Image (cartoon, rainbow, N blue to C red):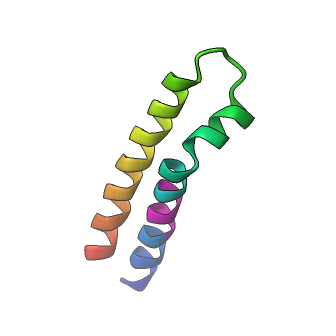
Amino acid sequence: MEIVAIIGTIILMIGIICIYDARQITKKIFSFGDQNEGTLALKVGGFVLSIIGGLLIML
């Protein structure tokens, strides 16, 4: 059970980093002109990862 909690914590942290640093990550990784779409995708993906990580911790 502790392994699942550790994996959940790691997934949760990755999700929070994606939400917080979405603009910088988009500038570094993607090279297309409209960065707002990339930022939105990273924030939504980070939110989903945070929910999944939180659920894994609760189990």
Q: Is residue 23 above or below residue 46?
A: above
Q: Nearer the viewer, residue 38 or 45?
A: 38
Q: Nearer the viewer, residue 33 or 51?
A: 33
For the C terminus, give its image quadrant: bottom left
Instruction: Name the outermost residue toward the bottom.
Output: 2
Residue drawn at x 39%, y 39% as measured from the top left: 44
At which x and y percent is residue 15? 47, 55
| Residue 11 falls inside the magenta stretch | yes
Q: Is residue 2 left or right of residue 56?
A: right
Instruction: Look at the magenta stretch and give its main secondary structure.
Output: helix
Residue drawn at x 45%, y 32% as measured from the top left: 40
At which x and y percent is residue 35? 59, 24
At which x and y percent is residue 19? 48, 49
Instruction: Name the outermost residue toward the top.
Output: 33
Q: Which residues are magenta?
A: 10-15
| Residue 52 falls inside the magenta stretch | no
Q: Is residue 41 left or right of residue 27?
A: left
> How many numbered marks appear?
0
